[in-house]
């Protein structure tokens, strides 16, 4: 899992990973779309297959999308 403060940041990273062939999914609690503001409280998580986690983090760091831990 890769954590982001805002859903739109996670969605941007998701699109970038898809472009390089890594499947990813954004998870963010927004009450099923009823309360999008909830996402600002909890942020978002980008999930990738475990086998791709290290590569995903490296790709996103190299692109300047993900900061150093």
Image: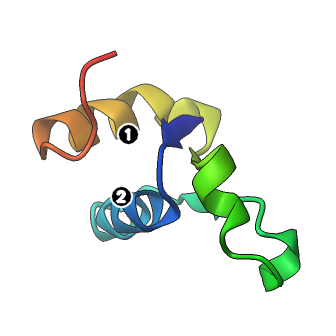
Q: What residue do we see at 54% from left, 58% from top?
A: 24
> In this view of the protein, can residue 63 be seen by the observer?
yes
| Residue 30 on image: x %, y % | 77, 68
**Dot 1 surroundings within 10 Å: few (below 14), some, or many (20 or more)?**
many
**Dot 2 surroundings within 10 Å: few (below 14), some, or many (20 or more)?**
many
Residue at the outermost top position = 69
Question: What separation in Å lies between label 2 and label 1 (alpha carbons)?
Answer: 9 Å
| Contact between labelled residues 1 and 2, with CB atoms less than 8 Å apart | no
| Residue 46 on image: x %, y % | 56, 49
Q: Relative to 37, is 53 above or below?
A: above
Helix, strand or loop status at disc 2: helix
**Residue under numbered circle 2:** 13
Identify the image quadrant of residue 8: bottom left
| Residue 35 on image: x %, y % | 78, 77
Please identify, in this view, whether the residue under mark 2 or under mark 1 is nearer the observer. Answer: 2
Q: Relative to 69, is 3 above or below?
A: below
On the rendered image, what quadrant is the C terminus found in? top left
**Residue under numbered circle 1:** 56
């Amino acid at each position: 899992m890769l954590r982001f403060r805002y859903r739109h940041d996670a969605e941007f990273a998701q699109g970038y990973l898809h472009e390089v062939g890594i499947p990813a999914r954004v998870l963010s609690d927004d009450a099923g779309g009823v309360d999008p503001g909830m996402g600002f409280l909890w942020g978002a998580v980008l999930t990738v297959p475990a086998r791709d986690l290290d590569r995903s983090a490296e790709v996103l760091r190299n692109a300047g999308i993900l900061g150093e831990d």
